[in-house]
Image (cartoon, rainbow, N blue to C red):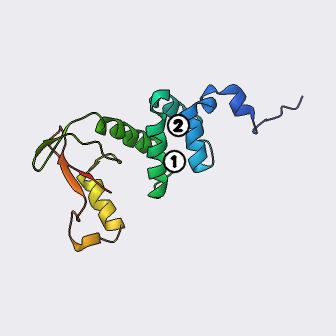
């Protein structure tokens, strides 16, 4: 008896994570499904009520040219985006409620992005980048 492997289409029949709206959004941006384990991570981490934030996260991720296989990094960024919408951050002038269009990123990521963009303004942080202090006391940046 010969066993036939059905690669095309069989995963959606066997794995309910393929039908997850969050996984479908991932597929829309990156043109393929993530691995089975990463689909489960996405399906477990992204509630349906937060699909717009997930979509914004993936749109930003792709526009920055970051790895499509780094699902853990996407989830981390997604969670920070949600936190940024609810957490009060302290800016240089005192306490300010901030709801940025992009989530704040830690200093080391902001510095790396500044270098990747060709060191705009010639100094770090360049004009227009807002430095905030997170609840942890560390510097974070809201990058346009």
The residue wearing badge 2 is: 38
Residue 3 x %, y %:
83, 31
Residue 24 x %, y %:
60, 38
Dot 2 crowding, Cα within 10 Å, few <14, some 14–19, many 20+ = some
Residue 35 in sight here: no
Tell me what residue is drawn at x 48 percent, y 46 percent: 58
The residue wearing badge 1 is: 69
Q: Secondary structure at mark 1?
A: loop
Task: Using residue 21 as the reference point, say whether residue 7 is left or right of it.
Answer: right
Labels 1 & 2 near each other (Cβ < 8 A): yes
Q: Compared with residue 77, is residue 17 higher up or lower down, i.e. above or below?
A: above
* Quarter of image, res 21: top right
Q: Secondary structure at mark 2?
A: helix
Task: Using residue 133 as the reference point, say whether residue 24 is left or right of it.
Answer: right
Tell me what residue is drawn at x 25 percent, y 61 percent: 128
Front residue of this view, candidates 110 and 59: 59
Q: Compared with residue 106, is residue 20 higher up or lower down, i.e. above or below?
A: above
Residue 2 x %, y %:
88, 32
Dot 1 crowding, Cα within 10 Å, few <14, some 14–19, many 20+ = few
Tell me what residue is drawn at x 49 percent, y 34 percent: 51
């Amino acid at each position: 008896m010969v066993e036939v492997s059905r690669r095309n289409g069989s995963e959606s029949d066997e794995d309910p994570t393929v039908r997850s709206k969050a996984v479908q959004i991932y597929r829309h941006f990156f043109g393929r499904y993530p691995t089975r384990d990463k689909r489960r991570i996405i399906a477990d981490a992204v509630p349906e009520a937060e699909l717009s934030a997930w979509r914004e996260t993936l749109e930003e991720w792709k526009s920055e040219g970051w790895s499509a296989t780094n699902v853990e990094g996407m989830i981390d960024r997604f969670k920070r985006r949600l936190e940024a919408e609810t957490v009060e951050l302290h800016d240089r002038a005192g306490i300010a409620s901030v709801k940025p269009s992009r989530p704040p990123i830690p200093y080391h990521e902001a510095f790396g992005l500044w270098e990747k963009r060709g060191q705009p303004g010639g100094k770090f942080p360049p004009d227009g980048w807002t430095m905030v202090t997170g609840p942890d006391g560390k510097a974070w940046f809201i990058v346009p």
